[in-house]
Amino acid sequence: MRNRQRKQLAVLLDPRAAAVWATSRRSDLAEAITAKGLHGAVGALSLCRAMLCLPPQSRLVFESISFQAMNMSFSGAKLALFLGQELLVIKRDDKPDIPYPGYWDLPGGGREGEESPEACVLRETLEEVSLSIPISDLTWSKSYQRPRGKVWFFVSHQSEELVKQVRLGSEGQCWRLMDPQDYCRNTLAVPHFAEQLLSYLGR
């Protein structure tokens, strides 16, 4: 059995071993938790049992590791990108094998490798509309649970001067600017993105 597999098994079956790792080998425990996953009932139960074995001063360490592991598990990210007062949207390809063909979409897409939600959405935005947005300009974010897993919704407000730099990538039929409220009401807006945007606008 490989060392990493032994760590996972210890987290699953022996909470006292997990407690030892939490206090002395943080990176190893984080790796084991991430590999095991925290969304299943067994994984969650194991963490609760391990928490009981920790001394009080070490529980915050374990909680921090657990939160980071859960936070890194996601399937994709989207960006509500405001250029001035208007929202940048992309008309999806009209292909029967993709979700919502021909609908108005937001920049973003699926995760690649082990990238963070921020890295994912910024990479996709660059690929889809040729805009390089600084990570510090992601001013709002929220995660949502979808059938395929957790997804992230980000917001960034940029100058309308960036409109001159927009170039459509290899996906999508065209792009345009749209009033954000009009997008939320548009019958061809991807429904869950319209709902997420409306939640942001009404915060």
Image (cartoon, grey):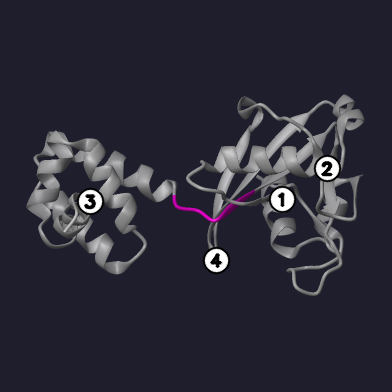
Q: Does the CB distance between marks 3 and 4 fall below 8 Å?
A: no
Query: As shown in the figure, which amino acid type bears the numbered disc 2?
Result: Leu
Answer above or below: position of 55 versus 158: below
**Local SS, label 1:** helix
State the image coordinates of residue 87 (x, y, percent, origin top left). Answer: 83, 42
Mark 2 surroundings within 10 Å by alpha-carbon count, few (fewer than 14), some (14 through 19), many (20 or more): many
Mark 4 surroundings within 10 Å by alpha-carbon count, few (fewer than 14), some (14 through 19), many (20 or more): few
Q: CA distance from mark 4 to mark 1?
A: 20 Å
Between disc 2 and disc 1, the foreground one is: 2
Residue 4, which numbered label? 3
Query: As shown in the figure, which amino acid type bears the numbered disc 1?
Result: Leu
Q: Earlier in the sequence, mark 3 or mark 4?
A: 3
Looking at the rendering, in which quadrant would you find the C terminus? top right
Question: Magenta stretch?
Answer: 73-77
The residue lying at 85 percent from left, 28 percent from top is 162
Between disc 2 and disc 4, the foreground one is: 4
Q: CA distance from mark 2 to mark 4?
A: 26 Å
State the image coordinates of residue 65 (x, y, percent, origin top left). Answer: 29, 41
Query: As shown in the figure, which amino acid type bears the numbered disc 4?
Result: Arg
Mark 3 surroundings within 10 Å by alpha-carbon count, few (fewer than 14), some (14 through 19), many (20 or more): some
Q: Does the CB distance between marks 4 and 1 fall below 8 Å?
A: no
Q: Earlier in the sequence, mark 2 or mark 4?
A: 2
The residue lying at 86 percent from left, 67 percent from top is 94
Residue hosting label 4: 148
Between disc 3 and disc 4, the foreground one is: 3
**Local SS, label 2:** strand
Answer above or below: position of 22 versus 172: above
Residue hosting label 2: 87
Which residue in the rendered view is the most extreme toward the bottom? 96
